[in-house]
Image: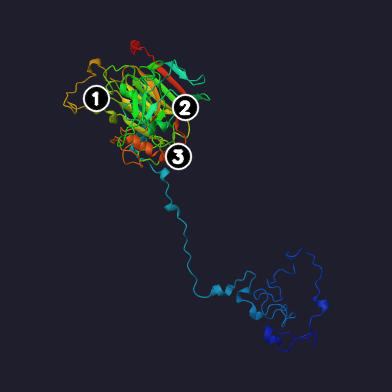
Amino acid sequence: MAGEFPKDAQGLYGRSVTGPAPSAATTATATPQYRPGTPTSESLGRNPFADGVESRSSHPPGHADVPSSGTNPFVSPETSRPASSYGSSSGRDASRFDEGPQRYFQSRRIRKDDIQKPWLEKVHPKEKWVTILPVIGILIGLGISGFLVWDGVRSVVKHKYCLVLEDDFSNGLNSNIWTKEVEVGGFGNGQFEWTTTSEENVFVRDSKLHIRATLTDSSLIEHDTVIDLLEDGTCTSDIVSNCVTATNTTSGNATIVQPARSGRIHTKKGARIKYGRVEVTAKMPRGDWLWPAIWMLPERDTYGPWPASGEIDILESRGNDWRYDQGGNDIASSALHWGPDPGNDAWWRTNNKRQALKTTYSAGFNTFGLEWSQKYLFTYINSRLLQVLYTNFNEPMWRRGNFPEANANGTRLNNIWSQTGRSNTPFDHPFYLILNVAVGGTNGWFEDGRSDKPWLNGSPNAKKDFWEHREDFIPTWTQPEMEVSKVMMWQQCNGDEELEEL
């Protein structure tokens, strides 16, 4: 019947449900006088289940406030409440902790007598030296370091320099300074280029000097040809073999004219120095078998023919890319050539290289420099701190070379530099500057068996083999030129250079 519960409800909920069911009037919720959650005097002491059954500790059984049977069938039955909920609203049953013997609690606090106070202890008088001695050592070390730095700075020679040449090519190529060389003899290295005066190979554009390599006209190679630079008066060498070349198409004959053309210019007429500085700002070429160089030769063969009078290579590189076995356009080399004859050139004792960092020397402009004095010579790139080669003239060059008593022909080798009494001979007389882009060669700058080189250095067919493989390497000639934006030369002018020779 409506308003009544089944008779077995007490067994289901665990408490008596006899009596009248709550009416709508008794179950209606009155408007609260307090905000929900605000404790009131009526709610104090009530258990957290809010079912009218107060905790047993605050209202023991038989208390007048505890009804023998509930009036709300929707509250939690007694059997569903955890035992820990009786006795307090915190959910703990105090009676559970009264079982068994009481445990002894041991304090973990440090006793006052155990606290160490080292600052109160008396220090032995000698212990202070443990601090004093290291401090004294540090001060002495700083003093010695400061002295060494001062002495090093004091000993650095500060040379005076006088400007000899400053050319930015804004007015073209000045013939009073620069001379174009015209030769077909390979310049002693078996080079494959014919250096010309043509505007195709040496020209100025947008205030920049260009020295460009090109291939020779095929008609001069495929047909019998004679090129005689003496006849037209353009040869700049006084050696006939450097001025005449020919193509012979007779069967079995491999003789051809130089398969490439390029440029080579120098300042022998317009600018020379004996000690001083040189800086050339340039971008290197890109292309297989190209050989750019910035270097210096002596104005006169004072001590004899090459290399007895010396050679200064400020920069040499290759147009091949970084994958080339010997190092391509990411490598810059510097060297000095010196010795009593070509077979005893001691260049390998004064040679070094520097690799470009994450770039190549054909990717942009760099400044390649030289500083040269009576006591030392060094080359650098972009900064005097980024040195490539450093040579100290602290012992005679003849002794440094450790040359044999005789050459390969059995001729006795005498010290050709001893008469000067200077340890830097043969680097003690005027030199001039050379800029050029060579092509190929048989002297070993491009070694045999490296990166599919198409010719052999010892072969009489070297030039012809190079020409016949042109279709393989010409696609790599994407930038077959050295581009120069500025050249500067300074003469050291301290007053002790003995410049009467200039």
Residue highlighted by disc 1:
341
Q: Are marks 1 and 2 in contact (CB under 8 Å)?
A: no
Against 133, residue 12 (above or below) is below
> Under tag 1, what secondary structure?
loop
- Cα separation between marks 1 and 2: 36 Å
Residue picked out by circle 2? 200
Task: Identify residue for label 3.
Answer: 475
Residue at 74% across, 88% down: 6
Work out how far the residue at label 1 is from the one at label 3, CA to CA, in angstroms: 39 Å
Residue 177 appears at what percent x and percent y? 43, 17
Q: Is residue 397 above or below residue 248?
A: above
**Which amino acid type corresponds to the residue marked 3 in the rendered image?**
Pro
Q: Is residue 484 visible?
A: no
| First in sequence: mark 1 vs mark 2 | 2
Residue farthest along the top direction in this orientation: 500
Q: Residue furthest right?
A: 25
Tell me the SS state at disc 3.
helix
Q: Quadrant of the N terminus?
A: bottom right
Task: Report the side of 95 relative to 339 (left or right).
Answer: right
**Residue 80 in which image quadrant:** bottom right
Closer-to-camera residue (310/216): 216
Q: Disc 2 or 3, which lies upstream in sequence? A: 2
Q: Which amino acid type corresponds to the residue marked 1 in the rendered image?
A: Asp
- What percent of the width, then of the height, locates residue 127? 35, 39
The label nearer to you, 1 versus 2, is 2
Instruction: Point out residue 433 in the picture as x, y percentages from the top left corner.
Output: 39, 21
Q: Quadrant of residue 482?
A: top left
